[in-house]
Amino acid sequence: MSQTNKIAIVNKSAPYGSSNGQESLDMALAMSNFAQEVSLFFIEDGVLQLLDTQRPTAIDAKAYHKTFKALEFYDIENIYVCKQSLAQRGIDSSQLCITTTLIETTELPELLASQQQVMCF
Amino acid sequence: MEYHFEFSGKNIATDKAGYLLNVEDWQTDMAPTLAQTENIQLTDNHWEVVKFVRQFYLEFNTSPAMRALVKAMANEFGPEKGNSRYLFKLFPKGPAKQATKIAGLPKPAKCL
Amino acid sequence: MSSFTLLVTSAPFSQQNAYSAYRFANAAVQSKHKVNGIFFYQSGTINGSNLQITPSDEFDLFNAWKTLSQQYQVPLMVCVSAASKRGITSTEDARDADNPHFSLSAPFESVGLGDLANLINNSDRLIQF
Amino acid sequence: MILHKVASSPFSHRALDHCLQRIHATDGLLLTQDAVYGLMDKELSTKLQQLEAVFVLKEDAEARGIEIEPSTIQLINYEQFVELCLKYEKVISW
């Protein structure tokens, strides 16, 4: 039992239909603030959270996607996005609001292997 | 209950703890008044942090938690200002809590 | 003996997750493992509402949580931010918001996400429901 | 080695599918809650049998009237569920 844990947070939900995305980000920021080492994964509909052109005020939702750009200040540098999930939705990585590491679908378990705990939202 | 204070003949709405309810209501000259409620006399060093925190919020739509504030300050002003001892000296009750209030930002989540 | 942190992110009744988490916690303590804490997040915070009324012929999860907590010293921790947004507030949180009502009381505790970080640090496994 | 826990029905949600696209050969799969309905799908059942370790939570299957034929799929109770979480290095709940 160490003082710091490597925690993976897997995001698989689209941003506004549920609170999953926003509360997952709150979780990531809090875990980092309390000295946990956080890695973020965006897969399936989760990749939609990263689209740069979102304007959620149109539906009275918080523009939490702007906060992704602040992740570097929270020392969250490992941000992985599923290549196939982007392709399926016709998204090019240049349309995302932050720079990420693109991974193959099948790479997820290997990357999770080096993590101690996993949360999924 | 509704809370507010008067500034330049206008009523400025706040929450019970004195944080502005509307970020856009803030103007630079309002900071000393807000600082007074925290018993802080603003120096240039305070101003630097207050402006920095407000800029952070406007850009990222969130107030920086302590750890992020330290890192972002270090990036911008170097390690002598980007450390928690320096920030706590300026804002003894917690920089994340007090600097955000003076900068007209929402009350940070209790969670953090 | 191993130790667990359970993360409950779903509301009671609407979904089965909280019931599964309760069963899991019970099985873990029966098997002499330690449950360091149940952390309620997102709609899971509604598990802490002391305004719940369960028909007498249905399983009373709210009271089951309380019994589990008292019998095996399992902390029931509710994320204050997630809870407040959903009308789950302690007397103190209600007072801070000038709200005459509160809906969270012992053994459920109003805590921050930092407490979850501590729980995780001290547990062998984190299981989410 | 990861234990993948799935709780939603594959007939209306894609969690099981998303999990199966990513599961590693040495990982374990645990079907709980509505995910046990997946066993009613012959094609899916066959696919699951190709995995090394598939578990079904007994109480959840029984509650839903799902009968599990003796196969490579193992029925477990809550005590075994607890031990399974310890056997694998971590648990992901899809």
Image (cartoon, coloured by chain):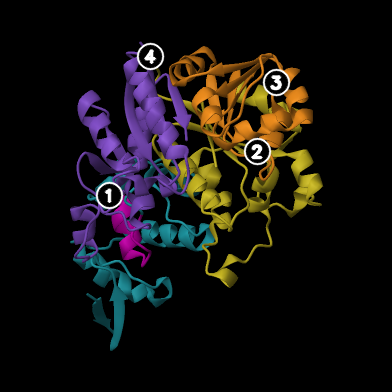
Chain colours: A yellow, B cyan, C purple, D orange
Q: Is residue C44 above or below residue D5?
A: below
Q: CA distance from mark 1 to mark 4?
A: 37 Å
For residue B96: magenta? Answer: yes
Q: CA distance from mark 4 to mark 3?
A: 25 Å
For residue A61: magenta? Answer: no
Q: CA distance from mark 3 to mark 1?
A: 46 Å
Whether label 4 touches label 2, CB < 8 Å? no
Have a look at marks 3 and 2 and say if they share a chain.
yes
The boundaries of the magenta stretch are B94-108
The residue carrying mark 2 is D15
Callout 4: 10 Å neighbours few (<14), some, many (20+)? some
* D41 on left or right of B50: right
Residue C2 circle label = 4
* Chain where mark 3 sits: D
Residue D24 circle label = 3
Callout 1: 10 Å neighbours few (<14), some, many (20+)? some
Decide which of A100, B7 is in the foreground and name it: A100
